[in-house]
Amino acid sequence: MKVKSLCWAVLWLLAACDKAPAPAESFAGLGSDAADFAQVVPGEVFSFPEDHGPHAGYRIEWWYVTANLKDAQGNQFGVQWTLFRNALKAGPTQPGWHDSTLWLGHAAVTSATRHYAAERFARGGVGQAGAQAAPFNAWIDDWNFASRPGVTGALNDMQLKAHGAQFAYDLRLTSQRPLVLQGDNGYSRKSDQGQASYYYSQPFFSAEGSVSIDGKTYQVSGPAWLDREWSSQPLSASQSGWDWFSLHLDRGAQLMLFRVRQTDGAPYLTGTWIDREGRTQTLHNGDIQLTPLHTTAIDGRQIPTRWSLKIPSKQLDITTEALNPNAWMNLSIPYWEGPVRFDGGVGYLEMTGY
């Protein structure tokens, strides 16, 4: 949502450059005031391909991709790719070194026995990192997520590339299904106090290509998921972190849901049920039963890596388990991110604030 997506947590490092200290009670400072930036309000009409590109008036946004992959022998892998944009101040973007935008990239590969992650940092305005709407391209250094040659507006034929010291991947992602607007036509609430993001997804990607781990290359394929979000204040001051799921069900449906944990009460819980045709139904707190069942000790933290998930109205009763419980993103801002599996499908889980 990575909520990667995160994936708000990792943006704290960039936001720290804003010289505005994060309040102790809000996770990563993302509950701090952002009055000078554009605000997320209901009723926004999305426009494509323009909204595939950056939104300069907003403080934060990200392009986030995950994939659940297998090779011919049945070995399972997970891949993550995320590009974050953070505006240090409100107002028009300035050229060159006067640009006040910072960029951060995260990439990871997970297998049942290995988990490798890497990050990149860049200053805006000098070409090292950025995003454009058409033809679509999002990049930081030589990591990129881009439309393949000849594709202009739609995100239906993409190439995804990244590498680190002990991993690499090069994947083609294709889909002829429609994009999915999360929440209320793309207006995604994150609290009962009104915090929200604009949020859309492409949960119907099919991926194929190569994944390399420790010098060995595997030919892989499987489902992939794109999340796009932008906001200026996505959390309330009392929210301490989140647990975010994107699930591919064998029956053809897709499911996104997240739980934002509160320091002063019950978590904020919501989601989207997406049928095989791309039609959506918003799920509310009363529709979802989400319970952590088992934790894994990682870096002095107890991380819930096995969950019970029930949605009675959809006849869904599953237990998700991490492919690799030690999928800890030990980066500048650490968090847990990795593939999960369950009887009837696969998916991804991201957990922050533990």
Image (tube, grey):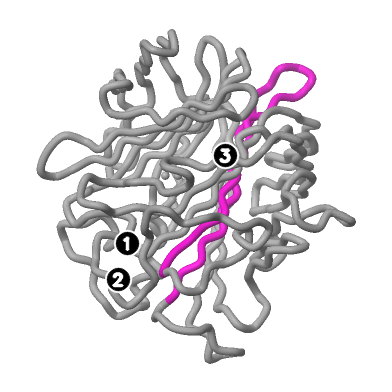
Residue 73 vs residue 346, the one in the foreground: 346
Q: CA distance from mark 2 to mark 1?
A: 6 Å
Rendered location of residue 294, percent (x, y): 31, 20
Q: CA distance from mark 3 to mark 1?
A: 22 Å
| Residue denoted by label 3 | 180
Contact (Cβ within 8 Å) of mark 2 with mark 1: yes
Contact (Cβ within 8 Å) of mark 3 with mark 2: no
Confirm whether residue 109 shows in the render: no
SS at badge 1 = loop
In the picture, the disc for residue 34 is 2
Query: Callout 3: 10 Å neighbours few (<14), some, many (20+)?
Result: many
In the picture, the disc for residue 317 is none
Disc 3 or disc 2, which is closer to the eye? 3
| Residue denoted by label 1 | 233
Q: Residue furthest left?
A: 264
Residue 35 vs residue 147, the one in the foreground: 35
Amino acid at circle 1: Gln
SS at badge 3 = strand
SS at badge 2 = loop
Q: Is residue 65 magenta?
A: yes
Where, quadrant-wise, is the C terminus in this rendering?
top left
- In the displayed structure image, the side of residue 84 where residue 187 appears, left or right: left
Q: Is residue 350 magenta?
A: no
Rendered location of residue 196, percent (x, y): 34, 52
